[in-house]
């Protein structure tokens, strides 16, 4: 690596200068919008300005970083300093779900939701210790590249390509979905248009410049999303914890919250509302049990009501309401069963007693034996989920790929530290935000009269009732906690208004969510198109492809994959978040054993890797297909015949997949011939930072330089 | 020898990683004493473990860099 000392340092300083000005400029931009808001700029224009200004900015960076050079296109020329690669990885990592949904999940699940916090940060220990430095030393372009070189032949590479595409595609659909949701909420466009608007933003930056453009855009996006997340948290901190850094002191707020929870648990009005929901759930259950007779009775009753009301010439709104009930009545007893089951579980959930926020593995079951069983099942599932998410983190190709881009092995190691540091800025704030918002709702909303509710409640429940709805169930005119139903996303979306910040900060949060979704989508699309163009086309089909040809094919595929992903998203597939969590398990089972043993065990060979990857992936797929309620229904299986092993939910299937993969890989490797000398030399090359490559392949092209970027 | 010491360090840090995560979660219901307002297990799962993870990556990067130099296997660095 014949680079003059000091040139990387100069590049680093130059980048620091650029991004300092950029951050300052962005803050000025927000301040200017704030001034305009004070002068009466309508909210919708603030939304428009944020969306188009940030998308335009990302596209601008993309155009400035356009390239047709292979090393620049695939690995940003391998000269991204550790610090900036850390920022880019953090943006790559934090998705729309993290930014918008994480705090809300913690609000709703209390302690148990922390499995996501632990899982999505602890995984970086595995990345740092077992994978990142060795991948950097290996110094190629993709994850299937490593599998192909280490285990020889196209089979291992092929399985890698398949697994990388499956995991990344599911994930990218979820990101584009997030873009659609954000644009619909902030600038009121139709979901379908929102999706394609977001697509333009994604392609604007990744299409022309590949990894190089994506890297510098992700750094810019990281800055926006961290600022957007921390400002409302700081303001809420000032309000309730007397500190702009509530991350360090929200323990006191938790204590006050616990006292308030005690009060609410004893409140007879709360009990009254819960009993109403309990009665509704019981009624739905009875109707389900008496199907199909209850279906006919219900239909007859609904028809009769419309007739009766018309006969006595009741007020029009009453008749309309009765007609609507009839219109929405299930069309068949089968449909009635599904609808009423949903009705039953929704009401039963709201009839459950209040959950104390800080209590681990809480169970509301009044029977102490059953409660104990439920609590230990929750504990096992917490552990299983946390470890699956960790191993998934250490196996997701779009994250690992980023560690190819640092100049040296040592910088790759430091870069994991910086990645985690930037991720912690958001991940340490999310639990604090959940507690602060919960405290606000428990004290400022609950117990108030319906007429004195703050404006944000009606505003957001108007945007989407699934985000937030407050209804006077027992008709006493006072808000009870059990009368509030909220979706997880509202916690972050409404945080600025709860903190009393102007609308411009709500717009900023929207821009932050968009940055989170776009940055992750960029990384994922690049992973998919690289797997297809570099691994499948160049390495397996046309070895003689010219470098320009390879980049051209890659860009073409990127466009194709993006359009297919946007099309799939516009169909609004259900259960998308479930699918993303499943992608983690699948990635962990497919890649983790082969990547780790490939570095740490010289005896691992091709047969072992192929068998291990297939067995691990297969075990995961088998467990998901036979235990996932949605798929069980699709295949017409009776859930009672397929009890989960050790009570583990299918979302954590890698708990079985990874050990199966490891064992099969070890056994098959030992039963077949040891790998050849070439492979052993490759392992040594990967292990020792100073060793020169044994074959002068693509390595030499990797230090191509161009002046200025970002 | 370089590789052996690298593996030993990796293993030690992995044990800390596993021990902290597993220990805090498995015994979460017993670790309910309060630290600055937080129930201890809640604090660890929401923040404490995360900081430990961050330290682990820092310790690894620093020690391995030192090990690289000690055994003369460091790359030609630009710093």
Image (tube, coloured by chain):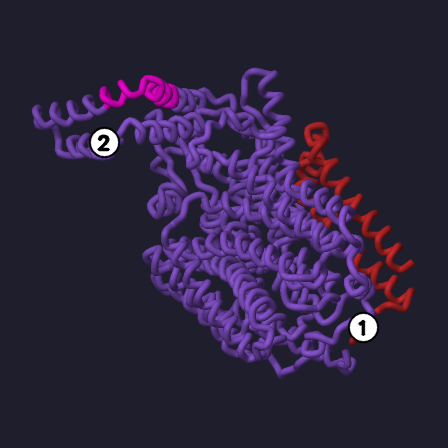
Kind of element beneath mark 1 = loop
Q: Which chain is purple?
A: A
Count of all numbered marks drawn on residues in the image:
2
Range of the magenta residues? Answer: A280-298
The quarter of the picture where the C terminus of chain B appears is bottom right
Residue A334 x %, y %: 31, 29
**Residue at the spot 83% in from the left edge and 70% down from the top edge:** A690
Question: In which image quadrant can residue A360 be found?
Answer: top right
Label 1 to label 2: alpha-carbon separation? 75 Å
Residue A429 x %, y %: 60, 49
* Chain ID at mark 2: A
Residue A683 x %, y %: 79, 61
**Residue at the spot 50% in from the left edge and 77% down from the top edge:** A63
Residue A537: tell me if it is visible.
yes
Question: In which image quadrant can residue A359 be found?
Answer: top right
Q: Which chain is red?
A: B
- Residue on which the image places disc 2: A325
**Which of the two labelled residues, at mark 1 and mark 2, occupies the earlier sequence position?**
2
**Residue at the spot 37% in from the left edge and 21% down from the top edge:** A285
Kind of element beneath mark 2 = helix
Q: Are marks 1 and 2 in contact (CB under 8 Å)?
A: no
- Residue on which the image places disc 1: A692
Classed neighbour count for the residue bearing mark 2: other residues with Cα under 10 Å, few (<14), some (14–19), many (≥20): some
């Amino acid at each position: 690596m014949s680079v003059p000392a000091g040139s990387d340092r100069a590049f680093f300083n130059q980048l620091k200068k650029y991004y300092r000005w950029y951050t300052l400029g962005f803050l000025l931009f927000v301040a200017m919008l704030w001034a305009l808001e004070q002068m009466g700029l309508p909210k919708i224009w603030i939304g428009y300005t944020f969306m188009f200004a940030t998308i335009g900015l990302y596209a601008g960076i993309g155009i400035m970083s356009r390239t047709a050079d292979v090393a620049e296109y695939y690995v940003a020329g391998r000269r991204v300093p550790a610090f900036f690669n850390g920022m880019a990885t953090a943006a790559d990592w934090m998705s729309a779900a993290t930014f918008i949904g994480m705090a809300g999940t913690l609000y709703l699940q209390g302690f148990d939701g922390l499995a996501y916090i632990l899982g999505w940060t602890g995984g970086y220990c595995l990345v740092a210790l077992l994978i990142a430095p060795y991948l950097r030393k290996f110094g190629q372009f993709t994850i299937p590249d490593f599998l192909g070189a280490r285990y020889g032949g196209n089979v291992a590479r092929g399985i890698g390509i398949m697994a990388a595409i499956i995991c990344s595609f599911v994930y990218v659909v979820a990101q584009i979905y997030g873009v659609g949701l954000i644009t619909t909420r902030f600038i009121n466009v139709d979901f379908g248009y929102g999706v394609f608007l977001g697509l333009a933003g994604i392609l604007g930056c990744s299409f022309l410049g590949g990894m190089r453009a994506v890297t510098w855009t992700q750094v810019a996006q990281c800055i926006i999303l961290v600022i957007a997340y921390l400002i409302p948290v700081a303001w809420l901190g000032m309000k309730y914890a007397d500190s702009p850094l509530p991350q360090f002191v929200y323990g006191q707020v938790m204590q006050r919250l616990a006292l308030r929870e005690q009060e609410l648990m004893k409140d007879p009005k709360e009990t009254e509302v819960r009993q109403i929901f309990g009665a509704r759930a019981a009624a739905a259950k009875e109707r389900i049990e008496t199907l199909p007779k209850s279906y006919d009775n219900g239909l007859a009753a609904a028809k009769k009501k419309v007739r009766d009301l018309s006969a006595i010439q009741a007020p029009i709104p009453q008749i309309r309401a009765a007609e609507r009930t009839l219109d929405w009545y299930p069309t068949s007893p089968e449909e009635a069963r599904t609808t009423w089951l949903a009705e039953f579980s929704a009401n039963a959930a709201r009839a459950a007693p209040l959950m104390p926020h800080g209590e681990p593995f809480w169970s509301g079951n009044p029977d102490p034996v059953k409660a104990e069983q439920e609590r230990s099942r929750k504990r096992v599932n917490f552990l299983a989920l946390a470890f699956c998410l960790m191993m998934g983190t250490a196996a997701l190709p779009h994250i690992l790929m980023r560690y190819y881009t640092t100049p040296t092995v040592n910088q790759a190691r430091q870069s994991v530290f910086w990645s985690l540091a930037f991720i912690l800025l958001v991940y340490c704030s999310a639990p604090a935000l959940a507690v602060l918002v919960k405290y606000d709702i428990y004290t400022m909303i609950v117990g108030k009269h319906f007429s004195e509710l703050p404006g944000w409640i009606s505003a957001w429940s108007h945007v989407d009732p699934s985000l937030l709805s407050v209804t006077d169930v027992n008709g006493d005119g006072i808000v009870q906690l059990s009368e509030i139903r909220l979706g997880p996303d509202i916690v972050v979306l409404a945080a600025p208004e709860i903190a009393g910040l102007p609308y411009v900060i709500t717009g900023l949060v929207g821009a932050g969510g968009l940055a989170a979704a776009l940055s992750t989508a960029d990384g994922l699309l690049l992973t998919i198109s690289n797997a297809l163009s570099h691994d499948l086309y160049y390495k397996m089909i046309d070895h003689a492809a010219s470098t320009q040809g390879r980049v051209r094919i890659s860009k073409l595929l990127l466009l194709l994959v993006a359009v297919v992903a946007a099309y799939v998203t516009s169909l609004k597939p259900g259960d998308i978040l479930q699918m993303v969590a499943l992608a983690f398990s699948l990635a962990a089972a497919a890649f983790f054993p082969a990547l780790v043993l490939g570095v740490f065990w010289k005896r691992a060979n091709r047969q072992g890797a192929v068998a291990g990857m297939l067995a691990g992936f297969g075990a995961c797929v088998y467990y998901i297909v036979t235990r996932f309620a949605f798929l069980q229904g699709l295949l017409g299986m009776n859930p009672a015949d397929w009890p989960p092993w050790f009570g583990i939910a299918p979302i954590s299937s890698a708990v079985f997949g990874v050990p199966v993969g490891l064992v099969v890989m070890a056994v098959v490797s030992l039963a077949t011939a040891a790998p050849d000398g070439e492979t052993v030399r490759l392992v040594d090359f990967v292990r020792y930072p100073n060793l020169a490559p044994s074959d002068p392949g693509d390595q030499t092209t990797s230090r191509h330089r161009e002046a200025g970027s970002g | 020898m370089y590789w052996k010491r690298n593996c030993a360090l990796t293993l030690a840090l992995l044990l800390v990683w596993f021990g902290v995560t597993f220990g805090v979660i498995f015994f979460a219901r017993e670790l309910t004493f309060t630290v600055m307002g937080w129930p201890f297990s809640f604090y660890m799962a929401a923040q404490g473990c995360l900081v430990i993870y961050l330290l682990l990556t820092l310790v690894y990067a620093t020690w391995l860099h030192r090990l690289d130099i000690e055994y003369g296997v460091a790359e030609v660095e630009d710093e």
